[in-house]
Image (tube, grey):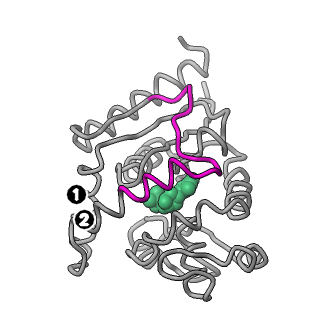
Amino acid sequence: MEQKRIIIAIDGFSSTGKSTMAKTLARRIGYAYIDTGAMYRAVTLYCLDNGLADHDGNVNEEQLASQLGNISIDFRVNPADGRSETYLNGRCVEREIRDMRVSSAVSNVAKIAAVRRALVARQQEMGRGKGIVMDGRDIGTVVFPDAEMKVYVTASAETRARRRYDELVAKGNTAVTYDEVLHNVVERDRIDTTRAESPLRKADDAYTLDNSHMSIEQQDQWLLDLYHKITKQCNGQD
Ligand code: DC
């Protein structure tokens, strides 16, 4: 029997490893993967490069709203390693959008209503055919409130800062300190959970995954087991 394709929404704090686990799940079950954080990061990069934001993310909202139509974001698979990469107006920005310059400004861009409206509409379009794993902050609450599978990922701020710091160092970024990264994580949590527009919160019907003390293999298995359980229910096999 053909399995019904579903929408999988994975939300949670920054640096919980959401993207890595969402990507692995998508690959294992043959679904598309969309990193919505990358979309907010790409808009932020556009702002920084075009004089619409300073490095703290103070944005000229009016000017940005009038230029949103000029910002095209898409994902393309790199044939060399099979990974999905983010493109901004036809240019690969996958590396640049992960820099501290963008990380420090992105929360302020992501709280702008016009930006959220434009990106949410684009995300809903991407998920129309189902068979998609999408990660972000508001996927289970705003983008796809009817998603069949919702997961809310959490871990302590220190655990997350350590992960992000190790990641930056592994990529050759030696200028940054652990304390700066921790500060950035805590500050982003504050903005993401207290903003007026779609604040980060757990959807009532989401499953919580606290991965502070889990290995990557354990999380991947947890997610896959949940997927099997939910698709069985959706296919009326339970
Ligand atoms: O997941 P990330 O750290 O790459 O996300 C970057 C920023 O974008 C983060 O500050 C939260 C914001 N974001 C959001 O507001 N809504 C989403 N669906 C995804 C990310």
Instruction: State the mark number for residue 191.
Output: none
Q: Nearer the viewer, residue 214 or 180?
A: 180
Query: Can residue 81 be spotted in the picture?
Result: yes
Disc 1: which residue: 162
Residue type (three-letter) at the residue carrying disc 1: Arg
Q: Look at the numbered disc 1 and give the secondary structure of its residue.
A: helix
Question: Any magenta on residue 118?
Answer: no
Q: Residue at x 68, y 64 (%)?
A: 115
Picture quarter containing residue 231?
top right
Q: Nearer the viewer, residue 80 or 99?
A: 99
Q: Position of residue 181 (x, y in %)?
A: 29, 65
Is ligand 1 within 8 Å of the beta carbon of the residue shown at mark 2?
Answer: no
**Image quarter in which the N terminus is found:** top right
Residue range (magenta): 186-207
Residue at far top of view: 238
Residue type (three-letter) at the residue carrying disc 2: Tyr
Q: Nearer the viewer, residue 89 or 109?
A: 109
Q: Position of residue 217 (x, y in %)?
A: 25, 41
Disc 2: which residue: 165
Q: Position of residue 145 (x, y in %)?
A: 66, 36
Q: Residue at x 22, y 57 (%)?
A: 162
| Mark 2 surroundings within 10 Å by alpha-carbon count, few (fewer than 14), some (14 through 19), many (20 or more) | many
| Mark 1 surroundings within 10 Å by alpha-carbon count, few (fewer than 14), some (14 through 19), many (20 or more) | some
Question: Any magenta on residue 192?
Answer: yes
Q: Residue at x 42, y 48 (%)?
A: 13
